[in-house]
Amino acid sequence: LDARRRVEFAALYRAACADLSLADTYHLPADTVRYLNQLVGRAHNQLYRTHKLETGGWADTLFRKVPQQLFHDRAVRLASLLFWGPFLASMFLASNYSPVPDFAEELIGEDGILDMENMHSQELGSGDVQGGIGSGFYIHHNASIGIRCFVWGLVFGIGGMFETLFNAVYLGAVFGHMTTVANPRYFFEFVTAHGPFELTAIVLCAAAGMKMGFSLVSTGGLRRLDALAKTARESMPILFTGVLLFIAAAFIEGFLSPSAAPYEAKAFVAMLSTLLLLGYMVVLGYSQQEGDAGVLATRGAAAAKPAERASPFDDPPTPTPTPTPTSAPRAPQPGGATP
């Protein structure tokens, strides 16, 4: 109900309570007291009702609204472009085919390169951090990356752009340099399985932060705090999707990635993860766009119908006036009276 109807509802509720009190005091007929009791009870339940956890709309939200938003959101597209483009370029510049031979050393540093090479110099399955302990560690580590990307995005969007570029260039340099070591198999056996979820989660967290940061610049006529609050509600599905992907990547990174499972199994998980991401973010998002066109056409056809009264407190629809047939005046009867 709008504000005026809410005020009217409250006034009617108070009046019904007063009538019930008077009916009890003056011992009015039992039917009247019973009617007023039921009326006050229904009004009380409406006025003081609690919002239960509604699960009926979860499927519509998860499989229609969220994919559609991820597919059409400009911040997600910008973050994807800022991450994957520099990531691939940095990976090429750090490889053996690079026109800049010392690109990785200058970006990561010699100590960082040595640590990375030593970390992935042993055969998988012999490390100390595995299973649940490893998953907890990677959840903390991945969350720190996502939080940085999200928080820096709040700095008018510019901070999120720089943080996204930094992560893209740094991670791309690591991937590119590890192709040049003597035995790169151990590194790629470790990162293949969880890579799709983890890298996509970085993009989504950065997109959510930048979307909120941009709202501080382009407020749409609102106050900055109001624009930020409005955009925060719109950014929550993007952020929550990134958080869920971080958690899924952490469990894969803790249990499967450091295990001695064959590389074919890890590659299968990576391909399955990629197909799930494409199906959820692209196929569902694009198909919902086509479906919404039919919905809008149906709504346009239904808009011509007269409005129905949705609530007893709504104004009744204005009836369409029907033309009254006119008849010619009759001639006066004898005696001067006209029937």
Image (spheres, rainbow, N blue to C red):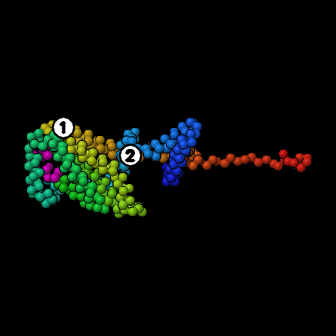
Magenta part of the chain: 174-187
Residue 169, quarter of picture: bottom left
Q: Residues within 10 Å of mark 1 (few under 14, many from 20)?
A: few
**What residue is at 29 percent from the left and 59 percent from the top?**
154
Viewer-proximal residue among 330 and 80: 330
Kind of residue at disc 1: Glu
Q: Position of residue 158 (x, y in %)?
A: 28, 62
N-terminal label among 2 and 1: 2
Q: Which mark is residue 65?
A: 2
Q: Position of residue 119 (x, y in %)?
A: 10, 48
* Of labels 2 and 1, the one closer to you: 2
Please identify the quadrant where the C terminus is shown. top right
Viewer-proximal residue among 204 and 16: 16
Using residue 45 as the reference point, say whether residue 61 is left or right of it. Answer: left
Q: Position of residue 181 (x, y in %)?
A: 10, 50
Kind of residue at disc 2: Lys
Q: Is residue 11 magenta-colored?
A: no
Element under disc 1: helix
Q: Position of residue 17 (x, y in %)?
A: 51, 45
**What residue is at 61 percent from the left and 49 percent from the top?**
318
> Up-down: is 159 above or below 292?
below
Q: Which residue is mark 1?
A: 264
